[in-house]
Image: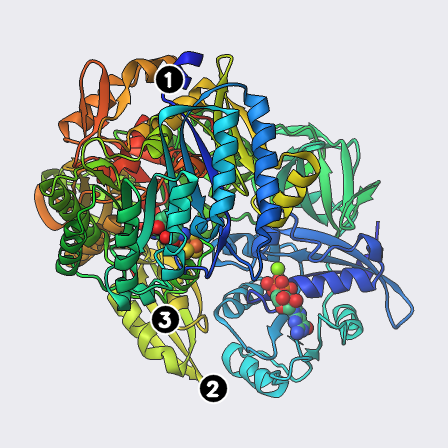
Amino acid sequence: MTELSQIRNFSIVAHIDHGKSTLADRLIQSTGTVQDREMKEQLLDSMDIERERGITIKAQTVRIDYRAADGQDYVLNLIDTPGHVDFAYEVSRSMKAVEGSLLVVDASQGVEAQTLANVYQAIEADHEIVPVLNKIDLPAAEPERVKEQIEDVIGIDASDAVEISAKTGLGIGDVLEAIVTRLPAPKGNADAPLKAMLVDSWYDAYLGVVVLVRVMDGVLKKSDRIRMMQTGAVYPVDRVGVFKPGMLPVDRLGPGELGFLTASIKQVRDTRVGDTITHEKKGAETPLPGFQPAQPVVFCGLFPVDSAEFEDLRDAIEKLALNDASFSYEMETSAALGFGFRCGFLGLLHLEVIRDRLEREYGIDLITTAPSVIYHVYKTDGTMIEMHNPADMPEAVHVDRIEEPRIKATILVPDDYLGDVLKLCQDRRGIQLDLTYAGSRAMVVYDLPLNEVVFDFYDRLKSVTKGYASFDYQMIGYAQDQLVKMQILVNDEPVDALSVMVHRARAEARGRVMCAKLKELIPQHMFKIPIQAAIGGRIIARETISALRKDVTAKCYGGDVTRKKKLLEKQKAGKKKMRQFGRVEIPQSAFINALKMDE
Amino acid sequence: MAEDLQAAGFGLYVHWPFCQAKCPYCDFNSHVSATVDQSRWQAALLRNLEVEAARIGPRRLDTIFFGGGTPSLMDPALVGAVIDAATSHFAPAEDIEITLEANPTSVEAGRFRGYAAAGVNRISMGVQALNDADLKALGRLHSAAEARAAFDIARGLFDRVSFDLIYARQNQTRDAWRTELGEALTMAVDHLSLYQLTIEDGTRFGDLHARGRLRGLPPDTLSADMYHDTQDICAAAGLPAYEVSNHARPGAESRHNLIYWRYGDYLGIGPGAHGRLSAGGTRRAEAALRAPGAWLDAVESTGRAVADEMELSPEDCADEYLMMAMRLREGVELDRLDALRGAPLDDRVLRDLEEMGFIGRSNARLWATDTGRPVLNAILRELMLDRVA
Ligand SMILES: Nc1nc2c(ncn2[C@@H]2O[C@H](COP(=O)(O)OP(=O)(O)O)[C@@H](O)[C@H]2O)c(=O)[nH]1
Ligand SMILES: C[S@@+](CC[C@H](N)C(=O)[O-])C[C@H]1O[C@@H](n2cnc3c(N)ncnc32)[C@H](O)[C@@H]1O
Ligand code: SF4
Ligand SMILES: [Mg+2]
C-alpha cells in the first residue's frame, strides 16, 4: 500500500496522432517500468486491430514507479484512454478514476476537435490539467502559437506548458516532474469502509473476468468477500494486483490506488461499469455516484456470406460480447440473407472493429447491412416503437410521425476548406449553431441528424478537406422530421438488406446514387438486371445493368489450358463470396458500398 | 477411359522460342537473341524428342506443329531433321498434317521452299493487320504489301495456308474492321484465325494499360459487335467459325489445334512447351522449362527439361475437356464428359443457360451457341466443378 501523498493518478488526453501512445511509451521506458528489450512500440495498444489502426480502444492502465527530483519515491498511475469519438464514453468514465490530465497537443498541428472534446471531459471531471506540447523536434512546430491557441480556445493557462518530443525523448523528465509537482495527490481514508469504483472489466483467457478498480476509501485484499452494490452479487476475491503493464499480484490496494481484482466472475456482463465495490460485511452505506452505461447508437445486420456459418457466427458474437458490454446483439432473419444478427454499436468505428475481428479472428465472411440509428416511430394508436431496422417500419397508414436522433457536431477546419465543410453539413440537413475563428482555423458547430453522419460523413469530411478537418460529436436528443423508408429492388425483387430510412426531400437523390452505385458494384450477368429505388409502391429511381456481352478468351491452345483453368477457378471461387438474390449474385461488399455518397 | 482419352488423336508440338523483335502485345514464350546456335538447338531438340518418345512408346502421330516465337527463323534443315526424327520415332498417319508458323517478312518467305522440301505441308502466317499504320502500332516488322507477297509465295508452295489477324485494335472502328475482313476473305484462303486483341499482363501493352496509357481500346459493347460481325461475314463467305476465333471451309480446320480442343494427347518439345499424355487410364500434364538457356542446359545434360509434371485427376480432366471443347462449335460429348466428372451436369443450370439461348444440347452433345460463344467464360464458370478454394 502506498501513502496517498506519494500517489499521482492521471490520464493523457489528445487528438488522434498527437502522440499520446508515444508519450506513454516514453514514460514507461524512461522510468525502467519495462526493460528496454521488452519494449514494443505502443505498449498499451494491445489488440491487433488497435496496433494496425494505431488507435486505442479499451482503457488501459500502467503503474510507474518514479524517484522524483525531491528524492522521494512516487507511484504514478496512468490510464490510457481511447481517442476516437465512438469511445468517448470510455474516456469519461476513466477520467472519474484519476485526478489530473496531461493535455498533449501536437505543436505542429495545434488544437483539434478531439482535443477539445476530451479536454472538456477532463475539466468536467475536475482535473488539474498540465498542457504538454509534443513534437517540438519538427521544423513546423510553433509552440508559442499553439500555447496562445490553447489559452484562446480552451481557456486554460498554457504559460507553463511542457515542451517535449516524445519521439526523441526530449523533455520527458520535465513531464514526470510536472506530474509529481503540479497534479494533486488523491484523497481517501484507509480506515473507512471499502469503496472502490469499477472502472472497466474484460475477459482474460487464463484469469476469467478481470476488473479494473480505483480504491476511494478502505483497503481491498486478497480473500476479502466483496459485494457489488448495484447488482448485490457477492464474490470472494481471488487476486488483487497492479499493471506494470503486465499483471503483477500485490497483497492489497489502498485508497488512491488503481489496480485489478479477479473473483471467479463468469461473464463481463455480470459486472456493471461504474458500480461501487464494497465488503460484504461492514460495507459502505452509500455507493459512489454511478455513471450511465454506454448505449449503442448505430445498428446493422451481420449475416454470414455462407449461410452454413450461422452457428459459427453466433459463437463468435457471443464470445466477443463477453468482453464488450457496449455491444448488443439479437437474432435477425432477413428474407434475402437468411439468419444473422442485428447488432448495436457505439459508432461506426466500433462497428468496423467488431466486424473486422469477426472476420479475422473467427474467419467468417460477413455481409454488413445498411447501418441505422434508432428512430422513434409514433403510431396513430398513441404507442411509440424504437425502431433500428427499416424492416420493422410499420405501414405508413399506422404512422403518425417519426423522430430521429440528432447530434451536436464540432468541426475544426482550415479557412480554405470552410466552404466545402459548410456545404457538406448543409447537404446533410445540418443547422448551423456556431462559427468562430481560432487563428486561421474555423470552428463550426452544427446540429445534424445522426443518420446523415453515421454512414460516411467522416470519410466525406476527410476527403473534402484533404484530411485537414477534425471532428467530434455528442448526442443532443430527438426531433421530428419527414422520414420515409426507401426500398431497393434488384431484378424486380426487394432486397430488404438494402432498405434505408431517408428524408423525403433527399430520397430521390439518394435513390439515384444508390442505384448508380449498385450498377457499378454488381457485376454484369448473362441477362440484364433492372435496379430500382422505391418508396411505398412508387419507383423513384432506376438503372439497368446491361447483360454481359463479351467474356471469352480469344486464344487457348495446348499450353494455355493450365493457366486459363486456374483463372476460371479463381473467378468461380470469387462467385462464392457473393450472395444469391433470385438469379442475381451480389458481392458482399456491395451492401455497404452502395450507401456511400460521393456527392 | 484410356482409349477414350487417346481417341482424339496425338500431335507433336515443337516450340521455337526466338523472334526478331518482341511485339508489344505478345506474352508468348519468345525471346530476342542476337545469335542463335542452330546446330546446338537441333541437337538438343532431337535429343529431347528421342528421350520423350522412348518414354511414351509407340503411337500413331497425326500432326506436327512448329510454333513460337518465330519458327520461320529456323533453318529448313533443322525443321527437316525434327520431322524425320518424329516420323521415325512415331508411326506417321498417312495424311499427317505438318504446320509451321511463319512471320511474313521477305527474308522468311525465302525459306518457304526449304520448309516445303523438309515436309511442311501447312503454313500459318502472322499477318495481324492489312494496313501499315496498324502494323506499326502492333510493333510488326513487316508491311502489308510484304505480308501479301509472302502469302502468295506460300500459296504457291503449300497445300494449305492460313493467316492470323488481330482485331478490336486501338482506335479501330466497326466499319474499318468489316472492310479489312472483307479484303482478307478475297485473298482466297480456306482458314483464318481472327483474334481480338487481348491485353496481357507482363507485356508492354499490359504495362501501358495498367498505367492508363493505352488509349483507344474498344469497350466491350463494341468488341462484342465486332465479334458478331466477324461471325456473320465469315459465315457468309463460306468460312464459318469452328472455334471461338478460328474459321475454315469445312474440312480445312487445323487438325493439330483440333487435338487440343478435342482434348486429345500431345507431346511438347522445346522451351515452355506443354504436353497432355494419357496412358494406363490416367492423364499427365507436363510443362518444360521456359527459359531457353535453362532448357538447353537441362536437355544437354539429362535429355529432359521438365519444369512441372503432374497426374491429372478425372475431375481436372473434366474441367479441361469442358474448357477446350466448348470452344468448338461441335461442343463436348456428354458421355465422355460425364464419365470424367463422375456425375452429369446440373440440369437446372443447363436449362437456365438453354432458355437464355447460350447453349444447345442434344442427347449426345452440348455446345455453346453463336450467342453463347462470346460469353464462354461465364458459361464455363457455371459448368465447371465446384472446388474447395
Ligand atoms: N516527429 C515526431 N513524431 C512523433 C512524436 N511523437 C509521436 N510522433 C509520431 O506521431 C504519430 C502518432 O503518434 P501516437 O503516439 O500513435 O499518437 P496517438 O494517436 O495520440 O496515440 C506516430 O507516427 C509517432 O511516431 C514527436 O515528438 N515527434
Ligand atoms: C504464337 S503467336 C505468333 C506467331 C508468329 N510469331 C507471329 O507473330 O506471326 C500466334 C498468334 O497469336 C496472336 N496473338 C498473339 N498475342 C496476341 C494478343 N495479345 N492478342 C490477340 N492475339 C494475339 C497473333 O495473331 C499471332 O499471330
Ligand atoms: S507475336 Fe510472334 S513475332 Fe511477335 S513477339 Fe510474339 S511470337 Fe514473336
Ligand atoms: Mg495511440
Q: Looking at numbered disc 2 in the image, what kind of residue is underneath it? A: Gly
Instruction: Look at mark 1 in the image and give the residue it sits on.
Output: B7
The picture quadrant where one finds residue A275 is top right
- Few, some or many C-alpha atoms within 10 Å of disc 3 (few <14, some 14-19, many ≥20)? some
Q: Looking at numbered disc 3 in the image, what kind of residue is underneath it? A: Val
Q: Are marks 2 and 3 in contact (CB under 8 Å)?
A: no
Calculate the distance from the C-alpha at mark 2 to the C-alpha at mark 3. Answer: 21 Å
- Few, some or many C-alpha atoms within 10 Å of disc 1 (few <14, some 14-19, many ≥20)? some
Question: Which secondary structure, mark 2?
Answer: loop
Q: Earlier in the sequence, mark 2 or mark 3?
A: 2
Question: Which secondary structure, mark 1?
Answer: loop
Given residues B139 and B211, the one toward you in this image is B139
Percent of width and height locating residue B120: 39, 40
Q: Ligand 1 closer than 8 Å to the CB at disc 2?
A: no
Q: Which mark is residue A464?
A: 3
Q: Ligand 2 closer than 8 Å to the CB at disc 1?
A: no
Does residue B272 appear to the left or right of A503 in the view shown? right
Question: Which secondary structure, mark 3?
Answer: helix
